[in-house]
Image: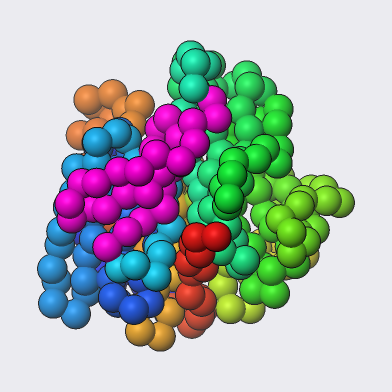
Amino acid sequence: MRLVNELELACELGEAVLWHPVQQSVWWTDIQGGKLYCYTPHDHALLDYTPPERLTAFAFTSDANRLMVSFASGFAYYWPTSGRVVWLAKPEQGHPGQRFNDGRADPQGRFWSGTMNEQQPHQPSSALYCYSRACRTELTGLRISNGLCWSPDGRTVYHADSPTRRITAYDFCATGGFSNPRLFAQTPQGAYPDGACTDAAGNVWSAHWGAAQVVCYSPQGEPLLTLSLPVSQPSCVAFGGADYRDLYITSAWQGMTDAQRKAEHRAGNLLVYRGAAKGRACDFYQPP
């Protein structure tokens, strides 16, 4: 794959990148910077919005103006252009240090997002939640919930608990339950699995925070390709473009010293690579 574009925005914590198939635009958030971005490649138009709270993950809806989101403190509908917010659930309210992190919609149109503890990221105090008509808990005892994505047939769901360096595969049923957990991949020391997506062939593309790479795994967990990057903290990946052959990669400078930032001046940029791999459209949230 070759680098074909780079948006020099220096996000402190770029995350949650998604391609909108109707708008033909890419969306992502800077969690710590408090921004939501939208970029349209055909005319190079860049929009940014300032949410009322840190926005950690989102899904598109049939209403072009409304997103389903996880803010730091919970689930909500959010209209970026007007700033309107309708809160839906705050399942971890009152738990110090806890905030939401990675999430997305599933093939049945429900929205999922997991949490982490910013004060004690290695403590198993976090969870993965699903929101449809109400909020329910699916996984507990997590450290940093991350890398949630589904196989093209919707029968397998992948989830990473970043500090453990483990990506787990589960059977996924139509009603939204996880079962039959098995180790999908164990990443090397210093390589923490972050945001992920699947391509049209069912391969899993995982951003490895701290290792300056994105790794493509077969559906059996075999590494097929390692894409080396000019940033050490890639955070999330998504395929897009009219033919879904562009790979969008967010990155971050969070936690770096001034010296590290000077040495890695591209940290926080959005990188766009192009190659033979073909992605697929993301799932939309469907309100019940």
Q: Is residue 240 left or right of residue 9?
A: right
Measured along the vertical axis of the image, is residue 152 above or below residue 103?
Answer: below
Judged from this view, the residue extending furthest toward the right is 180
Q: Is residue 213 left or right of residue 187?
A: left
State the image coordinates of residue 161 (x, y, percent, origin top left). 63, 38
Dividing the picture into quarters, in which one does residue 139 lie?
Answer: top right
131 to 165, vertically: above or below? below
Q: Is residue 154 visible?
A: yes
Q: To which quarter of the image does residue 193 belong?
A: top right
Quadrant containing the C terminus in the rendered view? bottom right
Depth order, front residue of 215/236: 236
| Residue range of the region highlighted in magenta in the rendering | 65-92
The answer to whether residue 226 of the structure is visible from this angle is no
Side of 103 where 184 appears, left or right: right
Between 221 and 242, the one nearer to me in the picture? 242
Q: Residue at x 73, y 48 (%)?
A: 168
- Does the magenta run of residues contain 187? no
Q: Quadrant of residue 174?
A: bottom right
| Dominant secondary structure, magenta | strand
| Left or right of 44 on screen, residue 150 | right
Q: Position of residue 5 (x, y in %)?
A: 25, 68
Q: Nearer the viewer, residue 256 or 249?
A: 249
Q: Residue at x 76, y 52 (%)?
A: 177
Estimate the x, y position of residue 89 in percent, counting from the top left: 49, 36
User: Where in the figure is residue 239, as x and y percent of width and height?
Assistant: 44, 70
Q: Magenta span has 66?
A: yes
